[in-house]
Amino acid sequence: MMPMYVRQILAVLRLELKKTFFARRGLWVYLVALAPALLYVGQDIEGPRHQKQLEQINRQHPLEPYKLANVTKGQTKQQVIALLGRPYSQRGPFGRPGRIQREIDWYTDGKREIMVEITDGLVTNVDPSGPPTIEGQTIVFATLFQNVYLRLGVFFGCIGIFANLFRGEMLDKSLHYYLLTPMPREVLVAGKFLAGLLVMCAIFCSGTTLQFAAMLGQFDRSVALNFLHTGGSAMLWSYVGVTLLACVAYGSLFVALGLLFRNPVVPAAFVLMWESIVMFMPVSLKELSIIYYLQCICPVAATVDKSMPAVLKMLVTSDSDPVTRRAAIVMLLAVSTVCLGIAAFRGRRLEINYAVE
């Protein structure tokens, strides 16, 4: 026969799932989870269209592919024009007469294009770009996933769902219905946490899968299937697993903060600030953050912005020996267990006074 506390958890879980999935105040979480996938879909649509434009431009103004590689920094504008002719698109010149003049030119051979930045008649930057590759797109996906989806999307989603599991019902003055039942407070905390976790995993793990699928959507079917059969599927499951662990870790943290503080937004803002600046900290301080262990589990390392100052770039890349995946998973589960223990301890002593809430 099923133990009493298990039946109580399932009862709470059933009630909370209905409220959490269809809560009006949480509809923005769906948008946060699906927005990156929509951006990839837009890229899938825009990429082929832009490629056709480049092919049409090259038919009108033919340009040999090898010539694009001969443009280097330090050349004069006249040398570039003699080599490539007039650009198919140009911005500038910028700047007042008598001061530094700057312009940006674009050239294409039908498949690739280069952006040439010219300052006072000299080439100061050459930025080539070509058709997307699987290898390049997996690195872009890793960078966006770690720096945007985990740091912002999952983070704010956990705030919206887990921090309001108790605080939202206090504001709605409905939490006392639970407290009047002969149910241990620890069971109530466990039921609410599991409900929030199921909702978060359903939303954000689906969002991760849709992003990955949309990322592959810009390639031919044969290329995408070959990638999936040669390690792509394992990579996808790794990202889904990282998303699940992020929901567990951040969720348990915000359940505890929602019970410890009357206004959990203030400590959540502090956590957000710490998770954002910790990438510039020494390794000993990085280990005090959740995002560090999540990044250690990711199958592909995120790239560093080339425009970042050298000192900050050195700090970001100073972690030459990250913890193993197994150790990272153990640490995340340990942090989650501690946070849930604190939440259960605080929930046992929870008292409601709607007059001061």
Image (spheres, grey):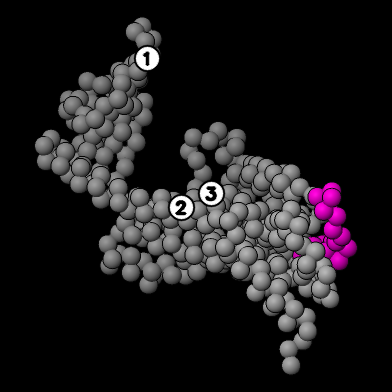
| Circles 2, 3 touching at the beta carbon (< 8 Å) | yes
Q: What element does badge 3 sit on?
A: helix
Q: What element does badge 2 sit on?
A: helix
Q: Which residue is mark 2?
A: 36
Compared with 56, 210 (above or below) is below
The tag earlier along the polypeptide, 2 or 3, is 2
Front residue (pair 239, 161): 161
Front residue (pair 10, 156): 10
Label 2 to label 1, Cα distance in Å?
37 Å
Specify the label residue 95 is tagged with: 1
Q: Residue at x 38, y 59 (%)?
A: 214
Compared with 191, 148 (above or below) is above
- Label 1 or label 3, whichever lies nearer to me, is 3
Specify the label residue 148 is tagged with: 3
**Residue 74 appears at what percent x and percent y?**
33, 24
Specify the label residue 340 is tagged with: none
Q: Name which residue type carries label 1.
A: Gly
